[in-house]
Amino acid sequence: MCGIVGATSVSEVLPILLKGLEKLEYRGYDSAGVYVNYSESKDYLIKAKGRVSALEEETSKVEIHGTSGIAHTRWATHGGVTVENAHPHKSEDGRFYLVHNGVIENYEALRDTYLQGVTLQSQTDTEVAVQLIDKFAKDNQLNALEALRMMISKLDGNSAYGFLLMDRQEPGIMYAAKRKSPLLIGVSEGTNVVTSDATAVLDITHDFIELIDGEVAIVSKDKVTLLNEAGETIVRAPYHLDIDESATDKGVYPYYMLKEIDEQAIVAHTLAQHYFDEAGQIINIDADIISQIKRADRLYIVAAGTSYHAGLVGKRYFEQWTHTPTEVHIASEFAYDQPLLSENPFFIFLSQSGETADSREVLQNIKAQQFPTLTIANVMNSTLTREADFALPLLAGPEIAVASTKAYTAQIIVQVILAHAVENSGLDLKEELAKLAIDMQTIIDDKEIFKTIAEEALDGQRSAFYIGRGLDAAVAMEAALKLKEISYVQTEGFAAGELKHGTISLIEDATPVFGLITQSKTAGLVRGNIEETKARGANAIVLATQSLSRPGDDYVLPDVNELLAPVLSVIPAQLIAYYSTLARGLDVDRPRNLAKSVTVQ
Amino acid sequence: MCGIVGATSVSEVLPILLKGLEKLEYRGYDSAGVYVNYSESKDYLIKAKGRVSALEEETSKVEIHGTSGIAHTRWATHGGVTVENAHPHKSEDGRFYLVHNGVIENYEALRDTYLQGVTLQSQTDTEVAVQLIDKFAKDNQLNALEALRMMISKLDGNSAYGFLLMDRQEPGIMYAAKRKSPLLIGVSEGTNVVTSDATAVLDITHDFIELIDGEVAIVSKDKVTLLNEAGETIVRAPYHLDIDESATDKGVYPYYMLKEIDEQAIVAHTLAQHYFDEAGQIINIDADIISQIKRADRLYIVAAGTSYHAGLVGKRYFEQWTHTPTEVHIASEFAYDQPLLSENPFFIFLSQSGETADSREVLQNIKAQQFPTLTIANVMNSTLTREADFALPLLAGPEIAVASTKAYTAQIIVQVILAHAVENSGLDLKEELAKLAIDMQTIIDDKEIFKTIAEEALDGQRSAFYIGRGLDAAVAMEAALKLKEISYVQTEGFAAGELKHGTISLIEDATPVFGLITQSKTAGLVRGNIEETKARGANAIVLATQSLSRPGDDYVLPDVNELLAPVLSVIPAQLIAYYSTLARGLDVDRPRNLAKSVTVQ
């Protein structure tokens, strides 16, 4: 994963780099580092383990000047979390400095072939890359650009990279190159920047030049030169990115996650406004999307993590309303074990960031097979939205907390709307969504109840379960992910009927088992399964919709069309995850080991 | 779940009942109980919490005589594990005694409607049933048969039951009734028995009369009368069951699980002998099965637990060799949320016992839709094999340990053979299976290695992960289930690429992460994912096939056709589960909360 930012300017760049890293922390926060060049003979390389704030403390100890530099925040892939493994990495002789986002698959083979005489300082694939550049430059009398391109030519096809390189001998110049990993060039008067994510530099510019796989860019403070894979100069105009920087501010909230949970009702409202006109007719969905889905004999939803769980819910809308069989696939599995496809498939990619490497790999394969593709994502202008035939926005606003909340509910709602657009569901959907938004707010406003449930049920527990059937099983999987990824309580989401086929042996005295009951046809069976866990000592917490509730249930959700229930029933789970994590004194927004946007495979 | 045995004889029945319960413990061992009738005025009801051995201790304290009786071993569904909740349950006045396997969905409504004046002694649905019989008998002057039928008529359609009822006023008579739950009548000279599983009474008889859903039987020591749902007498001839009772003996092994792991190579050999002739041609697969699969446009594999995991593997054979798109479904989900089906589906049910209630529910739905069905199971003459259009045996011999091992590998091998029978795989499959059996034995013989791995990696750990991609991901899920269901180490099996989308936050110092590497196209990616966990402190244990192994891997599996690798790579996981459970001092064969054959939904 990792986040990259670099700048070359008429003025000091350290503040730009540090502020950029702060914004990029969602891409990884195992370690951070910065390289600033003052002149051919004076430069600074500073690295620190942990958060960007640790790096800032280190840089504050030295007086640093320089008008060009590169910086990096790391999500560890190869090599442990140490200062040595932090980026930027440098060549043995201190000439080249490199930051990297991605994975070099064949770095061990390259190291063994070319770097026998070189003593490596780290366990990273990235250091191998920068040492190779130095080696090739020395051995073949190449300049930085040539050595970079030669190094790239040695990487195997599975490797992914966003590189940003500086050569101490050329102050003020950055070399950027990418394949599979995102990299953008931001342009402005007197300062040009390169970054893995536009949000890192929105206070500098909103104008960006896209870098395409295989290209290399030479960036100075007043000039950007693009070279294609053959080394020929190409020209590409910048595009203007219309994002409000202030939307990424968490304001009065202690954590972004709570802010984002709170925003869900507004997002539902925004989506209803965006996708329906005054008369309740669908708008803002390309007629081609609808006709292509109608033509498809089978839909394939491809996603990862929380988005995958949203896909499991979405499947029901497409099957029930558009009568199109729908399969939901984990992107990283589909990429290398593509199932047999139907004759006329239509692909839907779900993502928050639009940069998920696993999904991107699938998208490229599918495009090569010339099947139609749609990306539903929160960040438009992202790789997945740009590269798919069609794109629909989630309009959830920036999601900063690593644990996704409002993007999940938005993904479900957009799928609801899309399925309805393809084949009228018979619902007055705009009206239903308006009601849904009010119900969402009701549940959100009950946060003290979930705080109490979280503190009582999860105190001291290391395991938990969410169970349900049908749509409730799909939500149980997302609910479990939410809890485990931030509280580190190992939680499994289960089809309630499957628990007894082995996993129920984990239930012991007071193990929390959250039962979701929103589907009338299976409500009785889920209650039976909950009883089975209680018979073994479980502390069962039942969340049921009004009409299916019984005395003693722990929370009663408002009644809603049963197909739309996931949008409501996930909210208690989000709040339970939030409060149990808070009670454990952990960082809600930045759980260990994770990164917001997963741009490695 | 639960196990039922009853007997009426010319001689004492207590030994028959206790021996039967021992054999039935695999169906649940939360509590056990027995009712023996000596005469209208003298009878015995004895119950105990825990294993059958605890009940035997209780019965040994009293001198018990009687020539008819019923007994039960319980897997708790409604109501905790207590003596009060153990079966048999009796009516308030001590006239009726009932054992029950299944779940009465509407027992609370029935209780509130009919039993306001009755003080219930337990929290079970079963007691409601027996009190209803008594109530109906009293209020309406009904005999036992009439009262039983009236009670049954009040149960809602989702309820499942195998009932065995005795009326103190009619010594020597048992009333049996069933719906969804299995119940068989065993007949012999001087002794007739009723049981949920033939293996409980094989020392009495091998001749059984099948009871069909909705029927009631009146059984005395020399007569069996069957009534259909309308109350009309019907006649059905017994069938002879050809099972060797001695095969259920664990012999020199400390646990059945180890015996069954050891038997896997022999099972592979047996399957090769059974399904191929001398010339390597397929035999013993009905030509209709093959033609119906050829005709199908899509296969649906339906199963639960370990069998579901075997289906995930089987999918690849059908897709790669027969080129038929294949979906694998969790039975309990499919039953109530049936996905949109293709036009010409073919259904394959995978089961060990052939009695899995979840799968049976699906089979009944599918039969009602008149689609062709095949059951692949270990117990022929079981409900699923009898009710499907076709059946193929696993020939694994009795599997007694709750954690399935040899049935899983046998399920994979039979799917391999079946896919090859439909469309020649191009492999000399008989030869490949012979080689596979030898490789299986090699791994099994390395058990000391896995004992060491288990003891070192899992000592004191509460969490673990198995990861892999493609077929290795499917095996990872089974490997995780094996470990967690018997050792209670919460283990998740993951598609290696999906871990970073949240769950990786659970990795901490020394968390065991088992990496499976048997598939060349994803080997590099899985190694990358393993590195990601190591970078966060995980104790990575790598199991790789010879040609994909690297120095330092923890175990090297023999090279094999990559599609067949799951049969090998699961064995280390089985042995690691076994030895880590042993090291924790737990009962390997009978993990808490579980039952071998899951006959409730």
Image (tube, coloured by chain):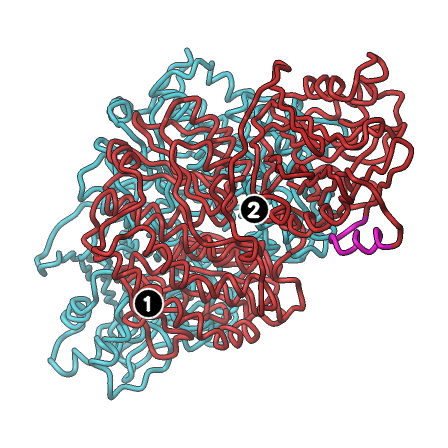
Chain colours: A cyan, B red
Q: How far is the residue under mark 1 from the one under mark 2?
A: 48 Å
Secondary structure predominantly adopted by residues drawn in magenta? helix
Q: Is residue A458 magenta?
A: no
Relative horizontal placement of residue A590, taking residue A24 as reference (left or right)? right
Rendered-image quadrant of the N terminus of chain B: top right
Q: Which residue is mark 2?
A: A501
Q: Which residue is mark 1?
A: A99
Q: Is residue B57 magenta?
A: yes
- The three-letter amino acid code for the residue at tag 2 is His
B509 up-or-down from B312: above or below: below
Question: Crowding at label 2, few (<14), some or many (≥20) Cα neighbours within 10 Å?
Answer: many
Q: Is residue B344 left or right of residue B113?
A: left
From the top left corner, tell me how far across and down residue A20 is, in percent: 41, 57
Magenta-tinted stretch: B48-60
Q: Is residue A422 visible?
A: yes
Side of A516 relative to A281 (left or right): right
Towards the viewer: B487 or A257: B487
Identity of the residue drawn at 33% across and 75% down: B550
Tag 1 subunit = A
Q: Is residue A464 something one can see in this rendering? A: no
